[in-house]
Image (cartoon, coloured by chain):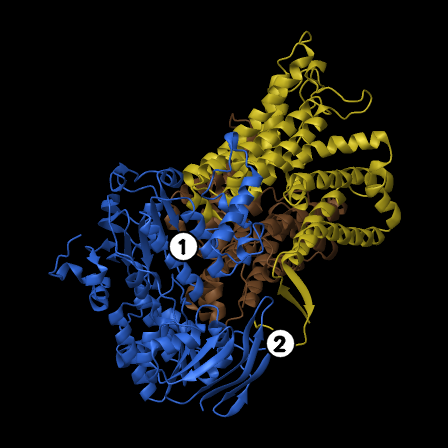
Chain colours: A brown, B yellow, C blue
Amino acid sequence: MMDSLPLLVAATLNSGTVLAFAALGLLINERAGIVNLGAEGIMLVAAVAGFATVVHTGSSWLGFAAGALAGAALAAAFGVLVIWLNTNQYATGLALSLFGVGFSAFVGIRYTQEKLGERPNFEIPGLADVPFLGPALFRQHPMVYVAIALTAAIAWFLYRSRSGLVLRAVGESPESAHALGYPVRRIRLAAVLFGGALCGISGAYISTVYTPLWVEGMIAGKGWIALALTTFATWRPARVLLGAYLFGGVTMLQFHLQGEGVQVPSQFLTMLPYLATIVVLVLISRNASFIRINMPASIGKPFFPG
Amino acid sequence: MLRLEQRPEPSKAMSIASPLLALAITVVIGTILFVLLGKDPLRGLAVFFVEPVRSAYALSELAMKATPLLLIALGLAVCFRSNVWNIGAEGQFVVGAIAASGIAMLATKDTGNWFFLPVLVGGIVGGMAWAAIVALLRDRFNANEILVSLMLVYVAEQLLNYLVYGPWKDPLGYNFPQTITFYKSTQVPRLFGSFRVNLGAIAALFAVGAFWLLLFRTYAGFQLQVGGLAPAAARYAGFSSRKALWSALLLSGGMAGLAGGLEVAGPLGQLTPHVPAGYGFAAIIVAFVGRLHPVGIVFSAILMSMFYIGGELAQSRLGLPKSLTGVFQGLLLFTLLACDTLIAYRVRWKTAGKGTGG
Amino acid sequence: MRLELVDISKQYPAVKANDRVSLQVAPGQIHAVLGENGAGKSTLMKIIYGAVRPDEGEIRWNGEPVQIASPAAARALGISMVYQHFSLFDTLTAAENVWLGLDKSLPLAEVTKRIREVAGIYGLEVDPLRPVHTLSVGERQRVEIVRALMTNPKLLILDEPTSVLTPQAVQTLFVTLRKLAAEGCSILYISHKLDEIRSLCHHCTVLRGGKVTGEVDPTRETNASLSRLMIGAEPPQLQHREARAGAVVLEVRSLSLPKEDPFGTSLEAISFEVRAGEVVGIAGVSGNGQQELMRALSGEDVRAPRGSIRLFDQDIARDTPRRRRRGGLHFVPEERLGRGAVPTLSLAQNTLLTRTRAVGRGGWIRVGDVNALAEALIRRFFVRAGGPGSAAKSLSGGNLQKFIVGREIDADPKLLIVSQPTWGVDVGAAAQIRGELLALRDNGCAVLVVSEELEELFEICDRLVVIAQGRVSPSLRTAEATIEQIGEWMSGLWRKDKSDAPA
């Protein structure tokens, strides 16, 4: 068990990174007051886009770029509807998810049997040989470290920069921000695009790094879990990252237990991440006024300038 | 440039025209898609819109597919009108199917032909129980029903897999993950002999009438709607939001469970991992396209079934992937939401320099 | 002239908000814009402030024609605005709020320092580091004013600034404003309060129905003459009859209620009573517990301790709104759309919120009866609406209020509680509503009125209490009360008051 612990940690970081990117993107969305239930659909389409790009070009980085672009494009359609046409945010996000499920399955048919070829092994020279910590922390794909850096950057942005303050103000009261002369709709669109791009990167990561293949529906609810994560983390970047690793850990634990031959039917182990999400939601939602103080007040509500 | 101007009163005409407009746009996009895929667009459109209504057999299949969509969407309409976002109807459908199967497997070869009734009741109870979890967690702990009901969909699917791969697997089934085929006595009676459409379709039509009465002629329905339209007014009037939450979820869970029961006691005749066919999610679209109105939902359910059947035909006749159905369904909802803006707003050409900023 | 508006017009889909309005403000002048609700004052201010563009007309700033394309452009010119409904962000500190209102990118620390300086100069107490949600309404207004002052305005616009202040605080504000004007800053003062305008302002433009009906020196006018310009007639006189108070209908006994909303107010040991045939008024600046008290009385909040609220000596503290209505308690809330009525439902459907005679057994709605009731209400209370099928949101504020008040009066209540009966309502409808309340009282009903307009309370109430920081004062007979005393009590100072008026 001891020598599989660093591997478990490494796998947790890997798995958590998936949720981290998506949840950080959704966090920026929700800080601006917009809830994007289309995360699952965006991640699916981005996963196909990323996978296809790597198949055709062999470049991992182009794959991430493709995922980000796909995510931003879908988010843009969502954003125009929700911000300018003031459609119901929940219904529109759902529509996007349903569309994404169908569209990704449709486009992905051609890629179902494809393989990505040799996947490079990453490691930080020197640090990677440190006993225990080396295999646990320093043999990760670069994007894992990017996720951590991104968390710090977003935290700095939100709490130490004026633009971050403006974003928070828009999320709390778009009417007041508009009265002060800020271009509320453009700010919200920027947040939605950024969020979509991050969800896209998450999707591309799943299909090109995490489990390098394409299968219909492979996101399996991670988009929804990422949404729960932002509430669970009360919209704070550091907590989002921690929560992502927590969930990543639960997912990995499930595989580990299955591998260890634990005498529980595999389906119940597969249920673990979803049940964990429910438990976490219940725990965090119990204190309604705690949520109210921390939640961007305008989430889900339409904004009408003038 | 184009500007949106608020209408003084919402346009009733657009309210009916909007779904039609959305359908038209979806058809246009579909045509483009067919051309891009190298298929004849006219044949493509025919497969979706003409073939499914060409013969009595086709109409029967249409009714069969429309029934679960209609039943689930009716329940969801009540939910959404009450601002309770039950997105997990798929999970309630699955658990309904599981419960119905459990009852069905109690039958022996001597059971009478009335046995389909307890089977269906089992389905309803199963769906209600699954939805009750969502209601409980929202009621006691304020947990968001969208996420809880969705997570429960995945849990329900795993539960189904466990049962059909494990304790309920037919020992004589060549190791396929499926239960025994249920006895004839558990089957919902067919309406016309050789066609597959069964009593479920009649039940669905009754449900339409019942739901219309509930929503628009009973005080309970009024309370639910006020709760969704203006929660502060509902509190002022003294309408119980807890009662609304439970009613909406139990009702929609029961309807989804009934649909699940009809599926296993009808066309499928057994429980397999393919029971979750996405009806629970498609019903969301049916509900919206039908304007959350029982009569509108009849039409949108028929439309969605045409998409389903068309997708299957497109696969067998044109070599197109079945997932095309999902694309069209998602597109339809998306365009509908966009077109709905026209109900409250007019589109005007305005020269630059006028109008509000922002 | 610092600011000149020439023939400004603005058309909205249903109404012409401004019709060839012309206005002139000199440097250092305190210029009132007087008009009742719906006269077009807000739209005009939004145009000056750059939030809305006029359809026609010209704006001149210091003699030069300008286009004010946005609030930022207005600020660049030197125009600053203090809103009636504050545009502050609750979860941010006062300093962050001010920072967001400034265009130049000064660092936050610098802004915080300047806030303290400016606040000191003008005598406005503001702690820059406190989050806004912990501030009282008066303190929030001070943050808004400091924010406006820090842009070094040449023209300051104030939109109904005194609706949230005690009479004493109003005087303090006036001192600040006069100082500003003396330094050369022009002030546009939007109000419908005649006394204030006559005491503070140098010049006054009167709007009615989107048009200018007069430009006068308010110090030379009387309330009656201003009223004539504002509504075209003298304010309607109400019939006053002697109150004949009967038995106690509502008794509130030591009602304490912890706040549910983290940004709300807790109630502490509230006691008062209302008798049949009298009107009791609750005076107070908004944000002192009125909302919470109303919710406890109406039944929207059922956490009150048992026995703390009694109707005809029956404990109703834990009863639902429907139970209370059956006991004869009816309530008109201050929010019309969204609480008193559902905006998208018809007037007929909206009667079903509190009137359920038309609902049969098993919950069946008799549509014919529902429509008949709505028709009757429209007729009896002179509601201008398309018919029982009109959506609630299609009515003007005054007409919807008449409908809602009428709906509750028509239910033949034993106790009617009304919160802000004439807020946002035109003068004609306001007079009608106040008349109806008095008629109700003359018929033996007990009436409880909560209002932020002291003049209104003095006009229709027989007795007054004051609510401050969640506590309620002893009651005073209106005839024996003065505005100064009530003003002091609104700051919570009744406990120092020696006079114990008989209940």
Determine the residue located farthest toward the left in the rendered image.
Answer: C498
Quarter occupied by residue C214: bottom left
At 24% across and 49% down in the image, what residue appears?
A: C245
Q: Position of residue C71 (x, y in %)?
A: 49, 76
**Which element is circle 2 on?**
loop
Which amino acid, mark 1?
A: Asn
What chain is tagged by disc 2?
Answer: B
Chain letter for mark 1: A
The answer to whether marks 1 and 2 mark residues whose Cβ atoms lie closer than 8 Å is: no
- Out of A143 and C284, give the one closest to the viewer: C284
Q: Quadrant of the N terminus of chain C?
A: bottom left
CA gap, disc 1 and disc 2: 39 Å
Of C27 and C438, nearer the camera is C438
Question: Could you classify mark 1 by the number of other residues whose Cα lies within 10 Å: few (under 14), some (14-19), or many (20 or more)?
Answer: some
Instruction: Residue under label 2, please give it.
Output: B354
Asked whether residue C423 is in view, the answer is: no
Q: Mark 1 vs mark 2: tell me if same chain.
A: no
Q: Position of residue B210 (x, y in %)?
A: 62, 32
Q: Nearer the viewer, residue B218 or A243?
A: B218
Q: Which residue is mark 1?
A: A294
- The residue mark sitting in front, 1 or 2, is 2
Give the answer, above or below, for where C276 lies relative to B279: below
Residue at 48%, 51% (x, y): give it.
Answer: C341
